[in-house]
Image (cartoon, grey):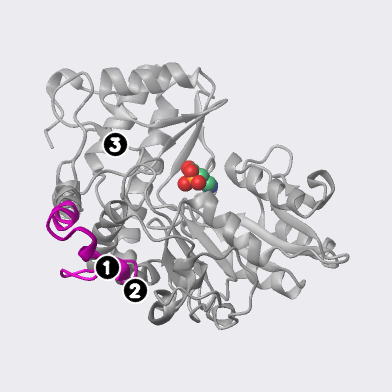
């Protein structure tokens, strides 16, 4: 971290370097990308899109490459972590991360694939009960997957997928409106599937209340945790969530396209007869290599595995989950809340300095309704703003059409100085 130089004097408050001294975070565990066009480091706010690389990741991949060189196929059985059992070591830290018991979690595949595998088990339209309730402002992949599942059952998404929009003039969904929609459709809902943290607005949903309401209405309730895992604290087991899936490349810092995670509640994993799209890695480990015809799943989330895991891609997930297990989710979430609060204060100062209406924060302010991300709506062209932020000021943030830029001060590695740089840069660009 370098001090702001005198030639960067801003109309805003001066930066107080004590903030980072008192609340330092863990940036030293990560590679922080350099300023794309200047000296020093960038101020990286895109951890909600792609998290940063832990220093330990390369060594972990190299170790597995070395084992492959040394053992060949014997690596399945030899060495400190035989590949055939590799995923088992990730189960406990994954469970810790999402508030599950270990039998309920498995690291496998990618997010949309896991949503499909889980919907194959949990979306079983029958008679009148055949609809899915979701949010309308959704990452498109979820919408495609849900429509495809409905079509897979020869139903029409236009009729069987209910997409909830915020009220006119509002940016985020109200819990009361979700509950009212569940109640309105209680006779025909088969599945309620929302994002726990909305990708665009950063809104955190009231997961326990919505889960309970959906289940009271007779539906299964699943959650996309893409923007929640590694961001906010969760208690999936205690909240009685039916299933959930997440990716590992955002707040979990496991690299582009990293292997994802899945949760299936304990009361479902014991039902080994549950329908699923099975593969050999979903059978019990003690009988798997007998190569028998009979599919013999264990009473754990492992039963949803299809193929054997990609070890070189599992190693970064292991490193990431270890960081979260060591530092712990509550500690990370509390620091991210402090950064989030500071960034919002600074953005308010920016709004006071620049022409009225240039920007406003759309992410809810209440601590339980947001995680790291602060989504800001701009009246100016967001491409120009994000380009200028990056190229002139080294501030990496993520623009989403038509008018929103997302800033994620990440509890693990973002700094107060990063936040100040973002606000200072915005003041200069917008003024
Ligand atoms: C909310 C949400 N769902 C789904 C996806 C798609 O994930 P994947 O490409 O890993 O399937 C993303 C990716 O960013 C996402 O943010």
Instruction: Choose between 315 and 291: the one closer to the eye.
Output: 291
Instruction: Choose between 245 and 29: the one closer to the eye.
Output: 245
Q: CA distance from mark 2 to mark 1?
A: 9 Å
Secondary element at image label 2: helix
Secondary element at image label 1: helix
Magenta stretch containing residue 329, yes or no? no
The residue beneath circle 2 is: 92
- Inspect this view and state whether residue 162 appears: no
| Mark 2 or mark 1: whose residue is earlier in sequence | 2
Residue positioned 82% across, 47% down in the render: 156
Mark nearest the camera among 1 and 3 is 1
The residue beneath circle 1 is: 325
| Mark 3 or mark 2: whose residue is earlier in sequence | 3
Residue 384: x %, y % from top left: 43, 16
Total marks in image: 3
Quarter of the picture containing the N terminus is: top left
Callout 1 touching callout 3 (CB < 8 Å): no
Q: CA distance from mark 1 to mark 3?
A: 23 Å
Callout 2 touching callout 1 (CB < 8 Å): yes
Tell me: is circle 1 under 8 Å from ligand 1. Answer: no
Above or below, comparing residue 403 to residue 141 in the picture: above
Callout 3 touching callout 2 (CB < 8 Å): no
The residue beneath circle 3 is: 44
Residue 272: x %, y % from top left: 58, 80
Q: Which residues are magenta?
A: 63-88
Residue positioned 39% across, 61% down in the render: 308
């Amino acid at each position: 971290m370098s001090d702001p130089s005198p030639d960067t004097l801003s109309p805003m408050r001066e930066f107080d370097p004590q903030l980072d001294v008192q609340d330092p975070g863990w940036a030293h565990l990560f590679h922080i990308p350099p300023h794309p066009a200047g000296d020093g480091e960038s101020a990286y706010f895109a951890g909600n899109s792609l998290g940063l690389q832990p220093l330990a990741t390369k060594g972990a991949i190299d170790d597995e490459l070395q084992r492959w060189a040394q053992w060949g196929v014997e690596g399945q059985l030899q060495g400190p972590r035989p590949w055939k059992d590799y995923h088992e070591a990730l189960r406990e830290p994954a469970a810790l991360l999402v508030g599950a018991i270990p039998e309920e979690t498995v690291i496998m595949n990618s997010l949309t694939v896991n949503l499909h595998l889980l919907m194959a088990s949990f979306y079983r339209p029958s008679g009148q009960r055949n609809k899915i309730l979701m949010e309308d402002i959704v990452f498109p992949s979820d919408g495609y997957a849900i429509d495809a599942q409905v079509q897979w059952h020869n139903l029409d998404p236009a009729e069987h997928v209910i997409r909830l929009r915020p009220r006119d003039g509002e940016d985020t969904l109200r819990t009361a409106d979700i509950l009212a929609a569940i109640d309105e459709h209680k006779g025909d809902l088969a599945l309620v599937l929302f994002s726990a943290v909305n990708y665009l607005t950063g809104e955190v949903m009231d997961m326990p209340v919505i889960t309970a309401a959906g289940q009271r209405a007779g539906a299964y309730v699943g959650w996309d945790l893409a923007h929640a895992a590694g961001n906010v604290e969760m208690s999936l087991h205690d909240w009685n969530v039916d299933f959930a899936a997440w990716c590992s490349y955002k707040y979990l810092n496991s690299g582009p396209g990293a292997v994802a995670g899945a949760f299936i509640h304990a009361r479902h994993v014991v039902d080994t007869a549950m329908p699923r799209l099975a593969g050999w890695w979903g059978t019990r480990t003690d009988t798997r290599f007998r190569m028998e015809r009979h599919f013999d799943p264990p009473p754990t989330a492992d039963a949803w595995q299809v193929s054997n895991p990609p070890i070189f891609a599992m190693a970064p997930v292991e490193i990431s989950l270890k960081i979260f297990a060591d530092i712990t989710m509550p500690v990370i979430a509390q620091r991210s809340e402090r950064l989030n609060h500071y960034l919002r204060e600074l953005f308010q100062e920016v709004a006071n300095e620049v022409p009225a209406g240039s920007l406003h924060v759309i992410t809810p302010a209440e601590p339980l309704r947001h995680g790291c991300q602060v989504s800001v709506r701009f009246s100016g062209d967001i491409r120009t703003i994000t380009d200028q932020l990056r190229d002139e000021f080294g501030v990496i943030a993520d623009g989403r059409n038509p008018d929103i830029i997302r800033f994620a001060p990440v509890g693990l590695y973002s700094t107060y100085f990063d936040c100040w740089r973002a606000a200072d840069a915005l003041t200069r660009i917008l003024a």
